[in-house]
Image: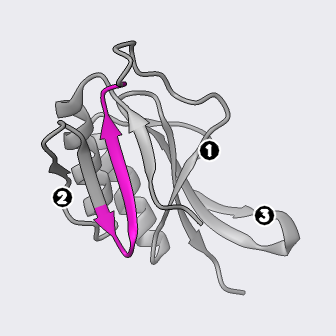
Amino acid sequence: MFTHVMLGADDMDAAKTFYDAALGALGIPEGVVDERGRLIYAHDGGRLLITRPINGEPASCANGGTIGFHAKSPEMADAWHAAGLAHGGTAIEDPPGVREATGGRRLYLAYLRDPSGNKLCAVHPVRA
């Protein structure tokens, strides 16, 4: 359904430090900066791009928006959360743990805000 997700950031160095650590904990390779100065992460056919806003205005986070990253285990979600906290992220929501989702599903969730304020979540489906 999605080809990519793009987020804005004013401090590209802080963004790279945060995302290299947090996404690295999920097994995603370090980001690459392209000729336009965009930070790009590519993994399993998906792409996450971080860029300074092209209109020159300050970056801002989406109110109500969340980007979820697949974690292969609860331990991987915890490692993502810890790496993000250690590299400029902020813990939000409840602490990482199992939550009841719609349709009787159970998910292990860990939430952070990146250094630009974007809301992120590591998600692992819990098998019954």
Label count reads 3
Mark 1 highlights which residue? 94
Mark-to-mark CA distance, 2 and 3: 31 Å
Amino acid marked by disc 3: Ala
Position in image of residue 96 (x %, y %): 54, 55
Question: What segment carries the magenta color?
Answer: 42-53
| Residue 71 relative to residue 95: left or right | left
- Whether the magenta-drawn stretch holds residue 43 is answered as yes
Q: Quadrant of residue 90?
A: top left
Q: Earlier in the sequence, mark 3 or mark 1?
A: 1
- Whether the magenta-drawn stretch holds residue 111 is answered as no
Mark 3 highlights which residue? 101
Majority secondary structure of magenta residues: strand
Amino acid marked by disc 1: Asp
Q: Earlier in the sequence, mark 1 or mark 2?
A: 2
Mark in front: 2 vs 3: 2
Q: Earlier in the sequence, mark 2 or mark 3?
A: 2
Q: Quadrant of residue 100?
A: bottom right
Mark-to-mark CA distance, 3 and 1: 15 Å
Callout 2: helix, strand or loop? loop
Mark 2 highlights which residue? 30
Mark in front: 3 vs 1: 3
Mark in front: 1 vs 2: 2
Residue shown at 23%/44% (left/top)?
Answer: 39
Q: Quadrant of residue 79?
A: bottom left
**Split into 4 quadrants, where in the image is the C terminus?**
bottom right
